[in-house]
Amino acid sequence: MSEVWDICKEALLYALKKVDVTLHSYVLMSNHYHMLITTPEANIDRFMMFFNLRLSQLISKKSGVINQKFSNRYKWSIVEDHNYLMNVYRYIYQNPVRANITKDCYSYPYSSLHFSKLEVKLFNYRPHINYHEEKSWFEERFGSDFEDTIRQGLNRERFKPSNSSSSFHLSILNRSFK
């Protein structure tokens, strides 16, 4: 997995040289990844094309297997509400916790939480929130129903919770955050 992490970072650097984006969060899982980015020129398709193409090329070269690397097209959602955005961060970083790979977000090594100072600069990494200052908030879990609410919201072009979301889950999403 550490080899794939290095390959992902190389592909990320390649795509960032081609397209101006700001990276806010990145987590690599064994069969997918989560990325939160801002595209000032509304060119996410171009960035993702460069990233996924380079990632696929590098994995093929390393593994010696020429085959499709991605089973689905990537998904994106515009998140305009600050409180929703903060919960998207939590959803991304908690992915390894939900998969029972690690006990907390920070213990998982394949995430942007572990970028070095040099990588922060190279990858134009600019999180909206500091994990170390908000650790208890990041690690707080609200159950699979809430996680489904986030997942469903991210399946929309513009992030918003479904009408069937419970009032409890909506209160969490709308809770004021710095």
Image: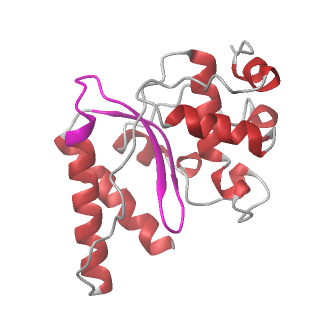
Q: Quadrant of the C terminus?
A: top right
Residue 166 left/right relative to 96: right
Q: Quadrant of residue 47?
A: top left
Identify which residue is drawn at 35% across, 44% down: 122
The x, y position of residue 125, in whole percent, is 44, 37
- Is 86 above or below relative to 150? above
- Is 12 above or below relative to 4? above
Residue 119 left/right relative to 52: right
The x, y position of residue 91, in whole percent, is 64, 41
- Is 113 above or below relative to 31? above
The residue lying toward the viewer, choosing from 86 and 10, is 86
Residue reaching furthest bottom? Answer: 64
The x, y position of residue 154, in whole percent, is 51, 35
Residue 140 within the segment the image draws in magenta: no
What is the span of residues highlighted in magenta in the rendered image?
Answer: 21-46
Residue reaching furthest front? Answer: 164
Identify which residue is drawn at 79% across, 20% down: 167
Q: How is the image coloured?
A: secondary structure
The residue lying toward the viewer, choosing from 55 and 112, is 55
The residue lying toward the viewer, choosing from 146 and 165, is 165
- Is 61 above or below relative to 161? below
Q: Quadrant of residue 65?
A: bottom left
Identify which residue is drawn at 34% across, 64% down: 70
Q: Quadrant of residue 76?
A: top left
The x, y position of residue 64, in whole percent, is 26, 87
Identify which residue is drawn at 82% across, 35% down: 136
Residue 24 within the segment the image draws in magenta: yes
